[in-house]
Amino acid sequence: MDTKQDLPKPSSAWRNALTLGLVAMVGTGLLAGVNQLTRQRVESQERRAALVQLGQLLPPSRYDNALQEDSYSFRDTVWFPSGQAITVYRARMGSEPIAAIFRLAATDGYNGDINLLIGINLDGSLTGVRVLSHKETPGLGDPIETAKSNWILTFSGRSLSNPEKDGWAVKSDGGEFDQFTGATITPRAVVKAVRMTLEYFAANKDLVFAQPADSLETASPR
Amino acid sequence: MSSYRKIFLDGFWLHNTGLMVLFGLCPLLAVTSTVVTGFALGIATTVALVFSSLAVSLVRGILAAEIRIPTYVLIIASVVTVIQLLMQAWFFDLYQVLGIFVPLIVTNCAILGRAEAFASRNSPLPSVVDGLATGLGFCLVLVLLGAVRELLGHGTLFSQARLIFGTPGDNLLLSVLPDHCGFLLALLPPGAFMCLGLLIAGRNWLASRSQQSQ
């Protein structure tokens, strides 16, 4: 009668636990194996993808060091109030510094972070700017992609003196950079991030190239 | 032989995941802005369905009723993670585009649904056929939806085919409407809902017509 209300017999609970454990073990073993087999290839793919992106900002002929090894990450809430981790790749020829590429996010876009690569020559001029990923509105904010428009290319060659300080804004804010029809916030965020990075580089140029590789430096307490 | 045919037709058309059962709407709407991304996720889902159905069918005899669902989830999660790793290794750029929707295949209730409704009661071969049919049916809807949205939104078909086929894939690009200025609504989620609604209406119309002619 009341067998249905009985707890499962201990033996069946053990059996169930054993079965589940076995399935979990087989699954984990399978994953570990596949991970082992694919890890190297995945890593080399990631490396290649990053190099392709870096290569768009700086042709490999201009440097002879391993860009991705000669990099470090830092946070600096004085210059970059969002507190994000920023990665810097240093390009050198011989031991002479050539340029630095910053990977950081424009944090005040319309929808989430706009991840950027910003390349700056030693003399403070931009080698270029590229968008790595973003979640801006398709059709309105996405002309920041090279696939959609050439807007982002207009940064190449610019510096803090070209245009002067007041020009580093979109046109509706009285600056020199075009906004998009129906989207001002997106280009404004990108322009601001590029300007902030240029200002940081101008003030900390020596530090950028002297920093040992792979250190996560917190310049200002968060 | 005819029973396999029936299983296939059932999963592929009569109980089509995307059009009739309406399982897996999240990826269905999220990745179908182009044919290529829709096709890629459709194939990944199909592979996940085939292998999880096979595995579930193989262990069905030794599972007690109380632990069958957690076991299915374990199996499905393992299969999908393997697919994710393989995709990352061999179709890295495609994986970058599909992003979170590859691991999210785990949560596609079509897979758990087929495991529970079919694979747990049938032997391996019919289960594989069922998984294949369900997956291909889902893939068909993803591709159709992707085609409609890409055509309306960009005026092209098969853009970004290089993500699957490498550089030769660029030759597949069809500019159907060369001077198309872009129809944003089709690319945004509301447009996806509307296109899906039209597809469902079309499927129902076809079904009712074939019923009348019988």
Image (cartoon, rainbow, N blue to C red):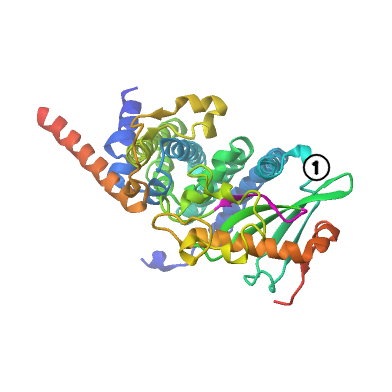
Residue at 58% x, 39% y: name it.
B93
Compared with A83, A19 (above or below) is above
Split into 4 quadrants, where in the image is the N terminus of chain A?
bottom left
Residue A112's x, y, as percent? 52, 62
Name the secondary structure under disc 1: loop
Residue B54's x, y, as percent? 49, 37
Magenta-highlighted residues: A122-133
In-front residue for pair B205/B68: B205
- Predominant secondary structure in magenta? strand
Compared with B113, B129 (above or below) is above
In-front residue for pair A81/B6: A81
Residue A113 visible (yes or no): no
Residue A57 visible (yes or no): yes
The extreme top residue here reads B1
Residue at 66% x, 53% y: name it.
A118
Q: Residues within 10 Å of mark 1 (few under 14, many from 20)?
A: some
Q: How many marks?
A: 1
Residue at 73% x, 77% y: name it.
A221
Relative to B33, B95 lies left or right: right
Residue B135's x, y, as percent? 41, 37
> Is B167 a magenta residue?
no
In-front residue for pair B104/A41: A41
In-front residue for pair B113/B211: B211
> Is A132 a magenta residue?
yes
For disc 1, the marked residue is A63
